[in-house]
Image (tube, coloured by chain):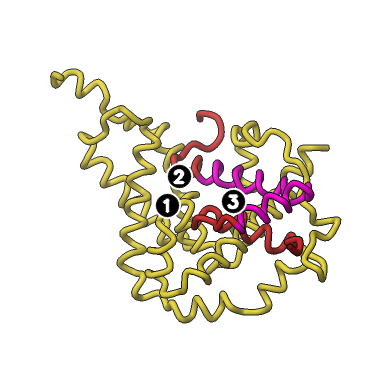
Chain colours: A yellow, B red
Amino acid sequence: MTNASAQAVSPPWDDASITAIRRDMLRFARMQLRDSGAAEDMVQEALMAAMTSAKSFAGRSTFKTWMFAILRNKIVDHIRTSAREISGADLVGRAGGDAELEDFDVLFDQRGFWNPDDRPATWADPEASFEQDAFWQVFDICMNNLPEHIARVYTMRELLELETAEICAELGISPNNCFVILHRARLGLRECLESRWFQGEAR
Amino acid sequence: MKMMNCKDATQLMSERYERTLSLRERLSLKVHTAMCAGCSNYGQHLDVLRKATARLREGNMGSER
């Protein structure tokens, strides 16, 4: 490979593409951190890191995917260094709260079967929904509707792709507790997406 | 064997992403979802959630802007 071909895949640093990517990066970081200030900082750091390591952009992935990988690494580092400051006990205390358990319990009847109104329906063409910006706005809202500690564990698992074992260890909670929290996140998110998006789509 | 309820079935469908279910768990889940349209849909929806979060991870939301 010559220098010329290396330059051919240099990242597109023009304003328009950065602005669009930056907006989506912010949305991602906010979903993860639930703190606008911290999210701004992370995105800024990721952008600076990207600019100084532009040589490592091999052009194999899209520019945006590459930027998101840098952002994810930044957030993982941030979480790993600050995990010791997050009170794991506090997290468990709140996660074990019965009030929240009951919140999700209302989906089921006394025997543990779906209430007729809450029974999951068929979702029409989710892939087509993924192409719509409005869907991601609803997804954002639904993520925000989750109690903070539940969203934290869920986003660590699904957006940062950390292993469940590591998440439990970082936060000082038992694997079983981790499973229950992830389960509640999925229950809540699914229910919200159905009522706010897919139900309207199907009709 | 007592039929599993939807509450337990949804919990197991979630745990499927976190650990390998035992043969017994897989069987009772299979029996349950074969008879329960709601839980059968639920299982598919969890896959949709997986795909959606994968998209978010890659920064692949919506059409190209």
**A120 vs A27, nearest the viewer:** A120
Dot 1 and dot 3 residues touching (CB under 8 Å): no
The quadrant of the image that shows the C terminus of chain A is top right
**A106 vs B8, nearest the viewer:** B8
In front: label 1 or label 2: 1
Dot 3 and dot 2 residues touching (CB under 8 Å): no
Q: Is the magenta region chiefly helix, strand or loop?
A: helix
Identify the residue shown where x is 67% and y is 58%. B10
Q: What amino acid type should be assigned to the residue bearing mark 2? A: Arg
**B22 vs A51, nearest the viewer:** B22
Question: In the image, A179: left or right of A142?
Answer: left
Pointer 1 and pointer 2 on the same chain:
no
Identify whether A196 is placed above or below A102.
above
- Report which residue position mark 3 lands on: A140
Identify whether B62 is placed above or below B42.
above
Identify whether A43 is placed above or below A154.
above
Pointer 3 and pointer 2 on the same chain:
no
**Residue B43 highlighted magenta (yes or no):** yes
Quarter occupied by residue A53 = top left
The answer to which of marks 1 and 3 sits earlier in the sequence is: 3
Mark-to-mark CA distance, 1 and 3: 18 Å
Determine the secondary structure under disc 3: helix
Q: What amino acid type should be assigned to the residue bearing mark 1? A: Glu
The answer for which chain carries disc 2 is B
- Report which residue position mark 2 lands on: B57
Identify the residue shown where x is 56% and y is 74%. A95
Q: Position of residue A31 (x, y in %)?
A: 51, 55
Residue count near mark 1 (Cα–Cα under 10 Å), binned few <14, some 14–19, many ≥20: some
